[in-house]
Image (cartoon, grey):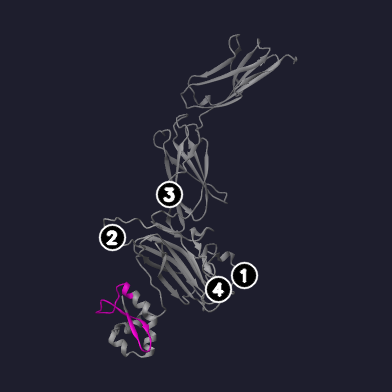
């Protein structure tokens, strides 16, 4: 090649052209410079098959190739070689019917919901980039993969009618396992076949709505659903699973798995081994929940919520588990909502209690250490739902109700005055049960109110009416 000769420089070097069937396609290859420029030839090819050839005239520095009516045979790679004595420059055009990728919509209001304790759902929303650039999209192929696993699950989402530019489309993902994250892939499908895919990650987080509808926490994530440790208690609750339990753990206390029986599942518990001491407290505080604002012109009762959880209290040194309602106002106050103490056996049990907050509130789960190291208390699957509990529980003593009925039937103020010291001491332990029975509408026959013994001394008997 002579020093004065240069290869033709052309544009575009590469261009992708997306078009639907039956539409025209015009490709233009332009010469930027070449020497010598007087003797320039061109040739158009499709996959090395010659389509058209010719020479440039003095007035033009570009060449065009037009497909008047694109068909399936027209898809492929087109090249235009511009040739002089020094060599050739090449324009490449990729003509395809591939659809553009969808674009995920990330501003969905409350996209995540909890429909069952162990699984969650997610509202997937997206728009389609340049939906009219190619043939109509007939479906989307949805792929979903749990993070950390290799297997993809796929399904097709059919599309009815044409998609408009900016149109928001929705598909609900269900049966997602808490607290796993998922990779989601969405691919448009046309007559051409699959288009470009888009991928996003769906991450679980326990939703806390401004006005509570339903809250569930199984402690499967390290964030523990925005629960916090009280900074003013004596020690902390610990997130734990049986699969990672220390081999030096204290036997004869604590659960062997989470509430579902899984050794991989997590729960919260208080470790009562040394250096813990009797009556030391560990307090786990829920996130704030907002009470819906009241209509000032309508007299209504405070809203009701059902607070529930599973507890495991097994061991000869079990102390006390309390649930307290903590309300925010001019001064933050706490009120006992539920309490239980002592060994409850080697199994998980459920507690439910109705609460009636009048302002923004939190629920505190308070574990109190008993007399020894065999006193681990565990909790799991904490829930909070609008409305009264359907089957509330009020465990506060280990005395069977059937043994209390003879005492309850004699609960009249004149009778109390004749009781012996031992009878009065027994009555102290049955007070909570009597309160619970009154709450459930199970008062002794013939009495609308129950008179409870609250303060007992040798010289003074005071009563509290519920």
Q: Label 2: how many residues lie within 10 Å, few (<14), some (14-19) or many (20+)? A: few
Q: Position of residue 4 (x, y in %)?
A: 73, 14
Instruction: Check disc 1 and report the residue beneath it.
Output: 247
Residue closer to the observer: 280 or 436: 280
Q: Residue furthest left?
A: 446
Q: Which residue is mark 4?
A: 272
Question: Dot 2: what SS?
Answer: loop
Find disc 2 in the rendering and name its residue. Answer: 300
Q: Quadrant of residue 432?
A: bottom left
Helix, strand or loop at mark 3:
loop
Q: Alpha-carbon distance for marks 4 and 3?
A: 40 Å
Which class describes the residues within 10 Å of circle 1: few (<14), some (14-19), or many (20+)? few
Q: Is residue 117 magenta?
A: no
Cα–Cα span, label 1 and label 3:
42 Å
| Element type where label 1 sits in the image | loop
Give the CA distance from mark 3 to mark 2: 28 Å
Q: Nearer the viewer, mark 1 or mark 3?
A: 3
Q: Is residue 398 above or below residue 423?
A: above
Indicate left or right for 371 with 389 as reference: right
Residue 259 seen from this side: no
Of mark 4 and mark 1, the one earlier in the sequence is: 1
Q: Secondary structure at mark 4?
A: loop
Quick one: 50 or 32, which is closer to the camera?
32
Mark 3 = which residue?
110
Task: Report, in whole angstroms, how far the alpha carbon at label 4 lies from the one at label 2.
Answer: 44 Å
Q: Residue furthest front?
A: 330
């Amino acid at each position: 090649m002579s020093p004065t000769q240069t290869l033709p420089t052309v544009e575009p070097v590469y261009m992708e052209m997306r078009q639907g069937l039956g539409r025209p396609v015009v490709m233009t290859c332009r010469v930027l410079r070449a020497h010598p420029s007087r003797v320039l030839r061109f040739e158009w090819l499709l996959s090395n098959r010659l389509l058209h050839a010719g020479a440039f005239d003095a007035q033009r520095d570009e060449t065009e190739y037009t497909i008047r009516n694109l068909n399936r045979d027209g898809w492929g790679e087109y090249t235009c070689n511009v040739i002089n004595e020094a060599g050739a420059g090449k324009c490449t055009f990729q003509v395809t019917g591939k659809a553009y990728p969808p674009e995920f919509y990330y501003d969905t209001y409350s996209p995540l919901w909890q429909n069952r304790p162990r699984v969650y759902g997610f509202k997937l929303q997206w728009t389609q980039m340049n939906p009219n650039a190619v043939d109509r999209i007939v479906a989307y192929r949805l792929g979903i993969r749990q993070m950390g696993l290799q297997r993809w699950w796929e399904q097709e989402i059919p599309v009815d009618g044409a998609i408009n530019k900016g149109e928001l489309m929705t598909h609900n993902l269900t049966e997602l396992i808490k607290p796993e994250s998922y990779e989601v892939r969405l691919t448009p499908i046309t007559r051409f076949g699959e288009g470009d895919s888009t991928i996003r990650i769906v991450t679980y987080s326990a939703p806390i709505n401004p006005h509570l509808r339903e809250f569930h926490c199984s402690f499967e994530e390290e964030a523990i659903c925005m629960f916090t440790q009280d900074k003013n208690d004596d020690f902390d609750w610990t997130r734990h699973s049986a699969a990672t339990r220390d081999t030096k753990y204290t036997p004869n206390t604590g659960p062997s798995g989470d509430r579902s029986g899984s050794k991989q599942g997590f729960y919260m518990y208080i470790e009562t081994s040394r250096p813990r001491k009797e009556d030391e407290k560990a307090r786990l505080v829920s996130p704030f929940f907002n009470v819906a604002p009241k209509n000032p012109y309508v007299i209504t009762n405070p809203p009701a919520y059902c607070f529930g959880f599973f507890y495991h209290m097994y061991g000869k040194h079990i102390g006390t588990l309390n649930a307290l309602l903590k309300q925010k106002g001019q001064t933050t106050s706490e009120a006992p909502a539920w309490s239980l103490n002592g060994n409850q056996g080697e199994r998980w049990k459920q507690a439910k209690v109705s609460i009636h907050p009048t302002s923004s509130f939190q629920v505190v789960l308070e574990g109190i250490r008993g007399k020894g190291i065999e006193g681990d208390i565990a909790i799991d699957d904490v829930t909070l739902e609008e409305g009264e509990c359907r089957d509330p529980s009020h465990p506060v003593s280990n005395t069977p109700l059937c043994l209390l009925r003879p005492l309850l039937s004699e609960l009249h103020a004149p009778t109390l005055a004749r009781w012996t010291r031992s009878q009065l001491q027994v009555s102290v332990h049955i007070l909570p049960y009597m309160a619970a029975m009154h709450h459930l509408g199970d008062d002794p026959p013939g009495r609308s109110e129950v008179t409870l013994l609250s303060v007992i001394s040798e010289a003074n008997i005071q009563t509290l009416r519920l």
